[in-house]
Each structure stands twice: as structure tokens, then as C-alpha cells.
């Protein structure tokens, strides 16, 4: 069954809004921690709030597992070179699990912060040497060397240009565009010879489409699957949005200072890392990867 959903700028702008309704989280002035019980309760609420309601497959997921029992299907979006880049943003720690990012960061605060998955490889002492600047800081902290980020290069079939929020992914002519997210996980290092984030997010018109011009091509064959939007606001409820995902399994190293420079000045008005949604593990909420 193919489901069509009318999207609006208001609803699209909530794709990466942070928040969840976790209860009984232990907090103090300096530290917040969600217990295993809280995460389990969030999963129970997600099951309850989606059961029998026709939600399509959800994201994020373990890309190393192909199983899934969700019966809602929709046409996969075109490959990204035939779509327009509309937004770039990133999450602290990987939302997806698999490939070279399988180390669990912990439960975090129950609202998407300090959770997700980290680069499972090793870095040199030089790559991990500290930097003086605060990188992409907000009330939840800053980025540090050794941190993992998952970057979402969002594409739309609508005739749009890159801009702030995912409301940039539609226009007045098409309210239900197909969406694709090209996903790359990076690890932050103190190395001027590592990749430059400003180059990785460089965009322009190519073959008639707005494109991210330097998405890595040497980080493994992308795992393709159909899912949804992400973000911790969906920890306890289903996302109704349909998204085609391409998740590369290998991690690339990026110079942390270049990420900091990007946070200070980019067309997307992104200045910090977003939180992560709990990994979706319920087979009824996952598509089968073919």
C-alpha cells in the first residue's frame, strides 16, 4: 500500500525539533542520565502509539540487519543526483548503527543528547590532541576531538534551493515531494590534513540540480532502505514522513576546526549538533532491506 502525505512548511520544520516525553529522568545541575528503564519505557510507548495505526517503516536502524516486517511500502526516491539538495544538518553521535559506528554512546539524557553510536575504530594521540576553541557549542555542550557526527544531506524532488530547516525541501508547487537523505558519518580529529567540512558541504548546480558537490565516494557502498524522519521528538511516537535513506558504512575523518568554522557561518543556519532518536528495533516498524 502506497501512502501519500501532504507536507507543509510547518510540519517539515519539525523534522529535527528536539524533545521527548521521557519521565523520571535523574537530573542535577551538571549531569542528566536516563536509566535503562526509561529507554525501555520509551520503546513501549513507541509500540503503543504506533500499533495498528498504519505507520510506515521508521528510522534510524541497524544497517547491518536486513530484517523488517513493516508492510507499508512506498516508491523509493530517485538517486540523489536527480534531486535537489535542500538542507544539510548533523547529529552528535550516529543515529544509525552499523559499519564502523557500533559503539553505544549510552542512554544520554532521554531527550536525544549524549546517546547514539560512536566510531568504533581507533585514533592516534595526535588526532586526539585537544583544541582551544569551543566547537559548535550550545546548552548541551560542545563538540570535541574524537566525537562522532552523522551528517544528513537532504534531497527533494521539489524545485527548491538549499536553505535553513527542512522546510526548504518543498515549495508551493509540490506539497508532498519525495525525500532522500544521503548519510555520512564522520569522526572529528585535530588534523589540518583531514577532510575540510566546508568542502564536504559545498554545494552548487550540477546537471540542472542543486547538489552537494563533495559527498565522499570512498566510504563503502551505501545501505539503501525506506524509512522515516528521525530526531528524538519521535522517541515515543511514529514519524509519518516517508524518506529514502542511503547510509554509508565507513567513517571518514574530518578536521574539527573546519566543523567549528562551518557552524559559525553557513546558509543552513546550523550552529550546533542535533540530538538523536532512539534506535528503532521493533521489527514491525522496520522495512526489509533488499
Image: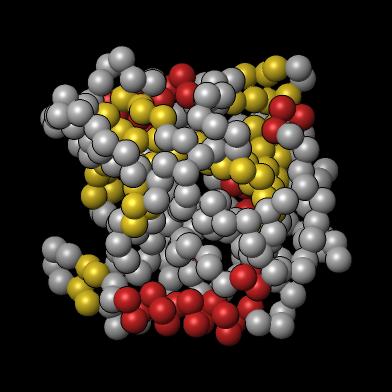
User: Can I make out residue 5 in this image?
Assistant: yes
Where residue 70 sits in the image (x, y, percent)?
A: 71, 68
Where residue 207 sits in the image (x, y, percent)?
A: 76, 17
Q: Quadrant of the N terminus?
A: bottom right
User: Can I make out residue 182 in this image?
Assistant: no
Where residue 210 sits in the image (x, y, percent)?
A: 68, 25
Q: Is residue 173 above or below residue 64?
A: above
Is residue 29 shown left or right of residue 152? Answer: left
Is residue 257 shown left or right of residue 235? Answer: left
Q: Is residue 241 above or below residue 200?
A: below
Residue found at x 35% / y 79%: 38
Q: Quadrant of residue 6?
A: bottom right
Residue found at x 32% / y 66%: 107
Residue found at x 29% / y 41%: 147
Using the image as rendered, state which of residue 206 and residue 284 is in the foreground.
284
Where residue 201 sits in the image (x, y, percent)?
A: 50, 26
Amino acid at each position: 500500500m502506497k501512502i501519500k502525505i501532504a507536507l507543509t512548511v510547518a510540519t517539515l520544520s519539525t523534522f529535527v525539533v528536539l524533545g521527548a516525553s521521557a519521565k523520571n529522568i535523574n537530573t542535577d545541575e551538571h549531569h542528566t542520565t536516563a536509566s535503562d528503564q526509561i529507554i525501555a519505557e520509551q520503546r513501549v510507548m513507541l509500540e503503543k502509539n504506533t500499533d495498528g495505526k498504519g505507520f510506515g517503516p521508521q528510522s534510524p536502524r541497524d544497517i547491518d540487519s536486513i530484517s523488517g516486517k513493516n508492510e507499508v511500502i512506498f516508491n523509493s526516491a530517485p538517486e540523489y543526483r536527480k534531486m535537489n539538495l535542500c538542507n544539510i544538518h548533523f547529529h552528535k553521535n550516529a543515529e544509525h548503527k552499523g559499519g564502523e559506528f557500533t559503539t553505544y554512546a549510552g542512554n544520554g539524557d532521554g531527550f536525544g543528547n549524549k546517546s547514539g553510536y560512536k566510531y568504533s575504530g581507533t585514533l592516534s594521540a595526535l588526532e586526539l590532541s585537544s583544541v582551544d576553541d569551543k566547537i559548535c557549542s550550545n546548552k548541551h555542550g560542545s563538540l570535541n576531538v574524537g566525537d562522532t557526527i552523522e551528517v544528513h544531506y537532504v534531497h527533494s524532488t521539489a524545485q527548491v534551493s538549499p536553505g535553513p530547516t527542512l522546510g526548504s525541501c518543498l515549495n508551493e508547487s509540490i506539497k508532498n515531494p519525495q525525500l532522500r537523505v544521503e548519510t555520512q558519518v564522520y569522526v572529528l580529529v585535530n588534523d589540518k590534513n583531514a577532510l575540510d567540512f566546508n568542502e564536504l558541504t559545498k554545494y552548487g548546480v550540477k546537471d540542472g540540480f542543486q547538489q552537494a558537490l563533495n559527498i565522499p565516494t570512498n566510504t563503502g557502498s551505501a545501505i539503501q532502505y525506506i524509512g522515516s524522519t528521525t530526531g528524538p521528538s519521535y522517541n515515543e511516537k511514529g514519524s509519518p514522513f516517508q524518506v529514502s535513506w542511503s547510509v554509508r558504512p565507513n567513517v571518514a575523518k574530518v578536521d574539527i576546526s573546519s566543523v567549528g568554522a562551518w557552524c559559525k557561518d553557513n546558509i543552513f543556519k546550523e550552529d550546533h549538533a542535533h540530538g538523536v532518536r532512539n534506535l528503532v528495533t521493533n521489527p514491525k516498524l522496520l522495512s526489509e532491506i533488499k
